[in-house]
Amino acid sequence: MSEELMQVQTEIGEEDGLSTILEIRSLHFHYGENPALKDINMKIYRNRITALIGPSGCGKSTFLRCLNRMNDLIPNTRVEGEVLLHGRNIYDRDIDPVRLRRNVGMVFQQPNPFPKSIYENVAYGPKMYGVRSRTALREVAEKSLQQAALWDEVAGRLQISALSLSGGQQQRLCIARTIAVEPEIILMDEPASALDPIATMKIEELMRHLAEAYTIIIVTHNMQQASRVSDYTAFFMVDENRSGYLVEYGKTQDIFIQPQNKQTEDYISGRFG
Amino acid sequence: MIGYTRRNVRTEMTRKAVLEAAGDNILLEKTKGHIFTGLCVAATLFGIVSLAALLVYVFRDAVGWLDWQFVTSTPSRFAEKAGVYPMIVGSTFVVALVAVFSLPLGVGAAVWLEEYARDNWMKRIIEMNIANLAGVPSIVYGLLGLGFFVSTLGLPHGIVLVGAFTLTLRVLPIVIVSSQEAIRAVPVSHRHASLGLGTTQWQMIRTVVLPESIPGIMTGTILALANAMGETAPLIMIGAATSIFTAPRGIFSSFSALPLQIYAWSDFPKQEFQHGVTPAAIIVLLIILLSMNGMAIYIRHRFRTKKS
């Protein structure tokens, strides 16, 4: 991609007067000796849903985990470049990844509620942050469950095990657990890939709702999903060295209706991937 | 193209011929399967039958001797008056102390190895050594206990504390290994869920790893403690009495344990001791061990039903 085009694409949201919340500058990522991501540059806009799409192995999930330093948990990995959150590089020495993750929450591919009650799951974060008051915790739990569109289904039985919920309910519970700690950004790693179409639809509706208050970045291998829910779409590809790179980034409608890049066009029209 | 097809046909024919020449082997293979199943059943029965025979033999001898008087009296020269009360107290006391010592040490070591230690050669060497220590004969631990706690630290011979320390060393490797397994069984996704919410490593361990692994840790520990309950050799080494007339009053009291008393009585020349009192003491020990195993099963089962 030419320098010029990149410039155009990274500035793409600014004409709409959107504020940038995250700015990724020449991000490289290595698993041991193997480069997994190379030279990623993009801006994430506040209160928008950004979808990361691309064939498997293109590094989109790895990229997502770079944004709240979950990759730190994998031994023998290395990050280069910058991820600026409100202009501060989250990989700076004085940034505590624990504090960062309180601001950049994450929802995983497989619903992963704790084997505790529904209430304990939602109240977990606030409790860990030191909230003691039972009334406050209960309020937070109720509000989060409402916001995650789960309240109507579980009201009155918050004490039952979270594992007795259906997969879709469990995933919404995980979303409730994440928003209970009020992050600014929510990262979602294929949050609906383990769910049936109806549960998927509910999650997508919920995401549109949440975008009013949060910035959402979602990895999906489902292009319809990306086109339905997201405002911006980034298309990743994998090169012959099996490292991922950003091919094209722009408004979702532009990417899907008039992609600038031949590879993007081939991918979204289903010619490969 | 034609050549390719013809070659294909020829291999097809040979393959068929080869298969036909082998004949029908289904019946033969099924018979082999039946024979193997039979051998497996026999192997299982061998274990169960010999254990049952042993139990029946011991039980038959113990009948008439095992009564309330037996579990509440002290040992005696006279078979009718003999009892195991001081040994029940001694064994329970020592094993309870072993539990108190080995749980924090074992779980602590397991948490460090699984959650904090980097996966490098040092960790691997430590783990290998722990696994080896689990296989060291218990009498060696007796020697270690004698050499370290008695000779070096100057603690008295045969007291509860030294017995408990020595048996703690004996069971510690088993407690560590089983705790490691329990900790490893906690899904990575649960750890990530917690860390992803911005918890520290220790918060995650305290609220996710430990609660989820406690049932497994308890099961392994109880089985290890049951092992300790049956230990004889190390207790002889540290100078525990084979027979004693008063139950230990504190950690510095002399004590004896059930297996030691069983060992002593089995050597008595009188028939009533060999075929009455000794089997009765064995039954008491077995009852204690079986209830400990039962407790382990109960904990595991309760956890499983609670989880689903």
Image (spheres, coloured by chain):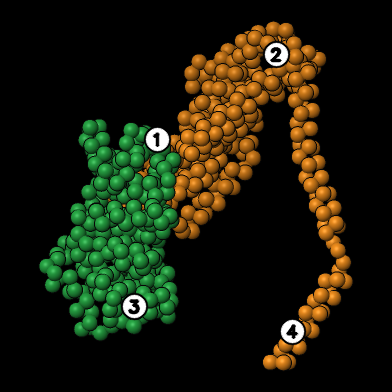
Chain colours: A green, B orange
Q: Which mark is residue B66?
A: 2
> Is B103 displayed left or right of A215 in the figure?
right
The numbered mark 3 sits on a residue in which chain?
A
Residue at the spot of label 4: B8
Residue B91 numbered tag: none
Residue A264: which numbered mark, if any?
Answer: 3
Secondary element under disc 3, as helix, strand or loop, is: helix
Mark 2 and mark 1: Cα distance apart in space: 48 Å
- Foreground label between 2 and 1: 1
Q: Quadrant of the C terminus of chain A?
A: bottom left
Circle 2 Cα neighbour tier, 10 Å, few/some/many (<14 / 14–19 / ≥20)? many
**Within 10 angstroms of label 3, few (less than 14), some, or many (20 or more) residues?**
many
Query: Given the image, what chain letter belongs to the residue carrying mark 2?
Result: B
Q: Circle 1 sits on which residue?
A: A160
* Rendering coords of residue A81 (x, y %): 26, 71
Q: Amino acid at mark 1?
A: Ile
Position of A42 relative to B262 (above/below): below
* Distance of label 3 from label 2 (alpha carbons): 84 Å
- Horizontal side, residue A101 vs residue B226: left or right: left
The residue that appears at 39% across and 47% down in the rendered structure is A170
Q: CA distance from mark 4 to mark 1?
A: 64 Å
Residue at the image point whose x is 47% and y is 32% from the top: B101
Q: Quadrant of the N terminus of chain A?
A: bottom left
Residue found 34% across the figure and 35% down from its top: A158
